[in-house]
Amino acid sequence: MLIVSPLIRLALKIASIILFVITLAASYGGKVNPDYVTFTSVMVLALPYLAIATLLTGIAWLLSKRIIMAALAGLTLFAGWSTLKDVTPVSFPKTPQDEARTFTVMTFNCLHLADTTKSDAPGNRAIKFLIECGADIICLQELVNFEEPKEIHHWSREIIDSLYAAYPYRAGASQEGGIDLKVLSKFPVEEVPVTSSDPDDEAYWHDRRLWALFKVDIDGYSLPLLNFHMNSYNLTDTEREVVTDIKGVRTANKSYQEFRYEIFPKLGEAFRTRSQNVKEMIATTAGINTMIACGDFNDVPGSWSYGLMRKAGFHDAYAETSFGPRNTFNQFLFLFHIDQIFYKGDRLKAIKTKRHRINTSDHYPVEATFEILP
């Protein structure tokens, strides 16, 4: 026992140090351009879980009175705090100066208003949720046409009319090309025509509209609103199940091979493409000083693309008003926070954010309350 205990303790120290190094590397992974290195961007996806593991490990060492190891855990979190404060924020809801000047914006990748968990349930749970949620403005992704029965789960004239009654103002990009960005609003809303700032990118941009710009009239205040749906990783359902398929050494090796040769290249391509598209979106709307930009970002806080938004002057409503990590994608154990609500400008203030738990889509809706400042 006297021989085994020091060996076990040494092994735990080595494992802890490896964890700390990986956590620190992941904290800075989003600083590395994915055009040159992909693996660091992949590490950022796991950062919330690495940070929690580091914190719990540090507490365990502290309780064991191993002060140096506990201090190393603390130093790791401190050194990565510039990123961790967005990934696992330590913030709380704010008190508005004037409750009458607040409004809510919700983003929801609604997956064509399908129902992935209760497909046999009567009616349409997603539409029922939209009617009852109470949000003032709803940005939807992956919805082409409210009036298409073939697209919407259990479509009926009655439920669509009920939705229209709850949200009398609606806008959405042109139906041509299967554009999937829509806005429901209790305030007057209209789409604002925009064109790509890069003539060489014009054809692609119109073929796959990644964002649309709207203007909402909130009791006389004109609010620019950007609804986006950035490029996904384009993984098949089989590839997404690579984690849940691990049930032993043999399946782990198979999953590793699949990740290395099939999934990893797709991730790299997605990171690079998304970076270019985010740059284009920022350049196209650079002349707008105050706005909200929200939707399915398909990338996490701390990532390279997320950093581009922050450098462009955008704040993260979730990071400023929430406590701890929060996933918005909910399937295949890919529990990532990829639906974002950004804002910029001196006249807007984020008050609180909320993640709704309805599970009709593979994304959870995220809602933020804002105040219009004098």
Image (cartoon, rainbow, N blue to C red):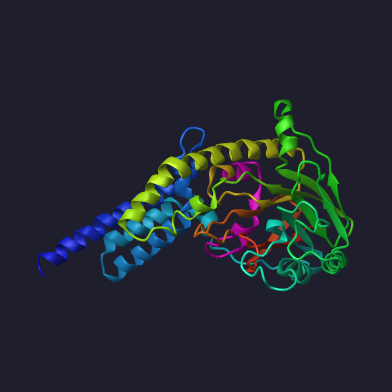
Q: Is residue 191 above or below residue 198?
A: below
Q: Position of residue 320 (x, y in %)?
A: 61, 59
Q: Is residue 345 visible?
A: no
Quadrant in the rendering for residue 206: top right
Q: Magenta residues? A: 306-328
Quadrant in which the N terminus appears: bottom left
Residue 374 sits in which quadrant? bottom right
User: Magenta stretch: residue 317 in it?
Assistant: yes
Nearer-the-camera pick, 31 or 169? 169
The residue at the point 70 percent across, 33 percent down is: 204
Residue found 16% across the figure and 61% down from its top:
7
Work out whether residue 156 or residue 163 is closer to the camera in this orientation and state it: 156
Residue 338 visible to the viewer:
yes
Residue at 62 percent across and 35 percent down: it is 276
Residue 228 pos. (x, y %): 70, 48
Residue 169 located within the stretch drawn in magenta: no
Give residue 220's position: percent from left, percent from top: 89, 56
Along the viewing direction, whichever of 254 and 33 lies nearer the viewer: 254
